[in-house]
Image (spheres, coloured by chain):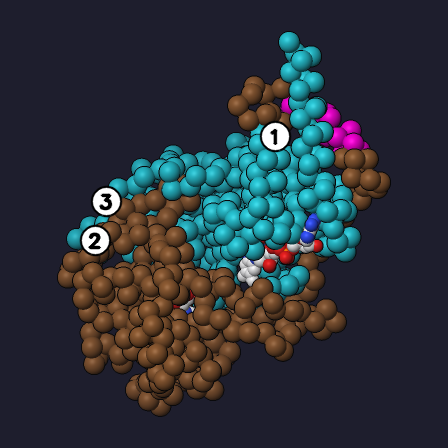
Chain colours: A cyan, B brown
Amino acid sequence: MIEDHRGIWVFAEVVDGSIAGVSLELLGAGRELADKLETPLAAVLLGHEVRQLTDPLIHHGADEVYVIDAPILRDYRTEPYLAGMGKLARMHLPEIILYGATPNGKDIASAVATDLKTGLTADCTMLDVDVDKRLLEASRPAFGGNIMATILCKKHRPQMATVRPKVMKALKPDSSRKGTVIEERLDMKEADIRTKVLEIVKGPGKSVNLEDADVIVCGGKGMGDEQGFQLIHQFAETIGATVGGTRDAVEAGWLSHDHQVGQTGETVTPKIYFAIGVSGAIQHTVGMKNSEIIIAVNNDPEAPIFDVATYGIVGDAREILPVLIDAFDELLKEEVVSHA
Amino acid sequence: MHIVVCVKQVPDTKVIKINPKTNTLDRRGVPSIMNPYDAHAVQEAVRLKREYGGKVSVLSMGPPQADAVIKKSIEIGADEGYLISDRAFAGADTLATSYALTKALEKISSASPIDMIFCGKHAIDGDTGQVGPGIASRLDIPPVTNITSITKVTKDYVELQRKLQDGYAHIRTSLPCLITIEKEINEIEYAPFPNMLKAVSYQPVVWNVDQLGEVDRKQLGLKGSPTIVGKMFAPPKQEGGHTLEGTPKEQVDQLLDVLHEKRHLFQKKGGAAV
Ligand SMILES: Cc1cc2nc3c(=O)[nH]c(=O)nc-3n(C[C@H](O)[C@H](O)[C@H](O)COP(=O)(O)OP(=O)(O)OC[C@H]3O[C@@H](n4cnc5c(N)ncnc54)[C@H](O)[C@@H]3O)c2cc1C
Ligand SMILES: Nc1ncnc2c1ncn2[C@@H]1O[C@H](COP(=O)(O)O)[C@@H](O)[C@H]1O
């Protein structure tokens, strides 16, 4: 019965012994939804030797934390995590479960959805609830154009969604918050699990660190060709920025997928984001619109990128960039001199 | 080794247009393509076949014209193709899709047991990546998502590299299993001429619902889909800033003026922060 389901859950992903940023952001978003629905907000924490992580979850907004702590949960694997989530969801009947749209978050969410035969909306960027109908309104960019679709799951519970990192806001941790910790056990043996993690290698998988960059120069299809895109690299080099690209630039082969910003790339929040020759399709802007300052260069004054830009320059990037490069060269040279 | 690759025909999202008045999808004249990730999945299966022997089958669910993606798979080197096509499948979300594909996989497997199922990491029209794990859990085989490399295959297990948020995991999983494929795994090779010839006249095996055996129709298509599209709307307008004016030089100068107080963020490559 749908009415038997109460409470909003957030899957608490553990990365390197701490709670992933996206899980804390989801607690922030979940708190708001839970208050509207007047229902508890719970975090679900699976892992090995993770009990000390229940406090940060409560401080960030959880009323309850469900914990399963077991050696078989040390590294993420679908089978034991599914067993854990499936067991908890069947026992405690949540009405909504939110997951970060990370590789592991998407993996577990898909498995749980099939196991519980319920709906799952992927890569959401907006969440709300219809209080009367107790419906989760999970919205995400859809299709190739500037459009959002709100997906509903009317007849099945729990209603589930994965949510992009960095689009929701975490609450300021409040160490005076109190919550309940509920421990459950998992009756599964290592021998029952068909997948083994042989080794985890950190880092080198990703050669670009867009996530932590203060300044990003992102080039789009408007750079014309690979040759034209070199101007993006030159400018980035001049100001010590990290290079990003749109999906179209990546697909044209001008730079590797690691550089892609947007719905299917990285979500970034630098202090300064240059979007050059970028049209500003929704799948791109969801990944960068929370940057502090956005500067757009585009020769089409109607390009949607100007709707999100703090400063817009209408003009040919191939003309503007050399001027920008010279000007910054000059500016930064001056600084060095004045420090000397 | 029998590998089945699930391949989906998708609208080329680059040319999709939205009707701004009705906020609906304008499908007129939108070409269909094979989901790019699925092409890499077929290529990887063909590579494994070359190395370890066996057979590569592909499976698609879609309208009759989806046979184009099966022909494309034959070009890359798949041996045989199956298309499940029926009005009853229409409007399926990922849960209903994984159900229908699972039924077809069971039928394929009863004639020729399957060792591995490959799916794309996600389909570019919806970007969900839910169908692969869904099939695995219905078949009760282990799913491994986001695979960038298949390093070892034996008759009992495979070893794989799985992409993580920062780095990768080296994983071993027993067969049969389901793998979802990232683009980095390979480069699509030029189709050998004999394959292209074969593809031209290739006719896939086509099944409708009745030919799939025991099927619970309530779990198919729109009826079997828990999620529905509630509404479509234009994204909330951001309050844009201002457009600068003047010649390129003048605009850049204005920009530099406002960025002056942020200049500590910039540093020349190789130089010290200023
Ligand atoms: C499911 C899905 C997921 C997607 N995920 C992503 C994603 O993660 N990231 C992403 O970026 N996209 C993504 N996209 C694609 C997205 O919809 C757009 O197609 C893409 O962002 C457009 O890239 P672009 O701006 O480089 O190219 P275009 O849209 O071709 O824009 C080029 C722009 O450059 C301007 N221009 C041309 N010449 C010049 C010049 N000389 N000087 C200055 N300006 C010039 C043009 O006016 C135009 O505005 C996704 C699409 C789908 C369907
Ligand atoms: N209609 C379909 N026919 C065949 N395979 C599909 C279909 N839909 C999804 N798939 C497979 O599932 C993968 C993920 O799709 P999705 O979950 O829709 O992002 C695709 O890359 C395909 O391998």
Secondary structure category for the residue under label 2: strand
Rendered image: mark on residue B256 = none
Say if labels 1 and 2 share a chain. no
Q: Are marks 1 and 2 in contact (CB under 8 Å)?
A: no
Quarter of the render that holds ligand 2: bottom left
Q: Residue at x 58, y 64 (%)?
A: B14
Q: Name the residue beneath numbered marker 1.
A: A238
Q: Residue at x 57, y 41 (%)?
A: A230
Residue B18 is drawn in which quadrant? Answer: bottom right
At label 1, counting other C-alpha atoms closer than 10 Å, the crowd grade (few under 14, some 14-19, many 20 or more) is: many
Q: Residue furthest left?
A: B155
Q: Position of residue A48 (x, y in %)?
A: 30, 41
Q: Name the residue beneath numbered marker 2.
A: B152
Q: Of the residues shown, which amino acid type is indicated by label 1?
A: Thr
Q: Name the residue beneath numbered marker 3.
A: A198
Chain ID for label 2? B
Residue A333 seen in the current view? yes
Q: Which span is picked out in magenta?
A: B253-265
Is A230 rendered above or below residue A327? Answer: below
Q: Is residue A177 left or right of residue B235?
A: left
Badge nearest the viewer, 1 or 2: 1
Q: Position of residue B24 (x, y in %)?
A: 66, 72
